[in-house]
Amino acid sequence: MAILNEIASFWWLWFVPAVVQASVIIAALAIVDSFLRRRVWPQIRLALWVMAAVKIILPPTFAMPTSLTTPIVERVAQQPEVSMLGRLLGGIPLVPVAPWTPPGETAAITLATGVFLVWLIGVALCGLFIMRRTAAVRRTLVAESESDVPSWILTILQSAEQQLGYGHRVQLRISPRLTSPAVMGAFKPTIILPREVVERKDTREVEHMLLHELAHVKRRDLLFHAIALGIQTLQWFNPFVWLLRRRLIETIELCCDATVAARLEARSMDYRETLLRLVGRTQGLAQPHPATLAFFGHSGQVIDRLDWLTRGSGRRLKQKNAVAAVVGGVFAMTVLPMNESRMPCEFEVIDVAPVTVPVTAGESTGM
Ligand SMILES: [Zn+2]
């Protein structure tokens, strides 16, 4: 029990301030993001949300002299009535490490150990649920889909790969169960087209759908998606982390549309039409599974996607990505470090005037 208490204490010292810090950043970003979503390029919003996700796995004691939040945290920490919040924001432990237990004596279970065990059970159940559901959906979709794809679709797939500059093979299947095309598998991606789309034999529509799903594969969105699911599993109890995953998926879709629009250039408005037609045909009912990224997923974001395509989201994509990388970097340096910038050893530094020691004749310094 003593060992368990000790592990739980170390977990608590890291985890509790990390949860509070991440929640504060996500809540603040969600407020700012509601103003940015129609005004700022999706690439910048994605960079900010990715950085908020990085914060979840950073140690709460992470400090940098460039931090904007450190002075606020330090000021809050000095006020006794809100010192607990200040201490948590600053990554300062609220509980000591488990008290030492003499050999031969049984240690009592601490509060930290109880919370640690509940968290651990939650992580195990949540992880198991996601893995089982992902495997079941994959099994069902693969079992009930056909790998026999008409040659005209394979030709379009090849052309789409060339347009995006993607040189790896992607599996393609046709399913009677899906209403929207989707892609799944972070390491072995499989694109699944609904049978209804294939039967319509609209080559332009299929090209747009394959470009969208291939863009997800090329951008490694499925890997991001899997990492976001992993983060959500670690903080299964935190609604702010659920919100973060949703915002990440929304901005990933907008950025994926921009990638396709950049390749289609003048034809990007046709792509917009395809998206609009699919929404009409499915009557906004297409619901993606967490393991997949669909051409049309959440009906709530369709307006944003159509709006950004109208505004030419594919133009000057390289410059937008470069600006987004800079904004993400600045956010990482100024907002993510929240701990006190002063290191404990700096408290001991005292200015001492240089002392001149008179050297008498005949003495040697020995150097
Ligand atoms: Zn998509």
Image (cartoon, rainbow, N blue to C red):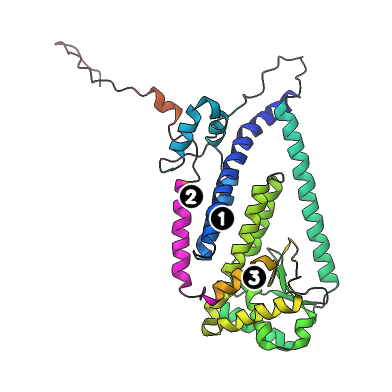
| Residue at position x 82%, y 55% in the image | 132
Residue at which label 3 appears: 302
Q: Which picture quadrant has residue 326?
A: bottom left
Q: Amino acid at mark 1?
A: Trp
Specify the amino acid type for callout 3.
Val
The answer to whether mark 2 and mark 3 are in CB contact below 8 A is no
Q: Is residue 238 above or below residue 362?
A: below
Q: Residue 332 — which label? A: 2
Residue name at image x 58 percent, y 48 percent: 27
Give ligand 1's quarter of the image: bottom right
Disc 2 is placed on an element classified as helix
Left or right: 179 with respect to 53? right
Q: Secondary structure at mark 3?
A: helix
* 289 versus 120 height, above or below: below
Q: Quadrant of residue 207?
A: bottom right
Between the C-alphas of marks 2 and 1, the distance is 11 Å
Q: What is the distance, in whole Å, between disc 2 and disc 3 at their CAs?
A: 30 Å
The x, y position of residue 19, in whole percent, is: 62, 40
Task: Point out the residue furthest to the left here.
Answer: 361
Q: Nearer the viewer, residue 116 or 7?
A: 116
Q: Which mark is residue 49?
A: 1
Name the spot of residue 293 as percent of width and height, x first. 69, 67
Of badges 2 and 1, the one in the foreground is 1
Q: Earlier in the sequence, mark 3 or mark 1?
A: 1
> What is the span of residues highlighted in magenta in the rendered image?
310-334
Closer to the camera in the image, 123 or 249: 249
Dot 1: what SS? Answer: helix
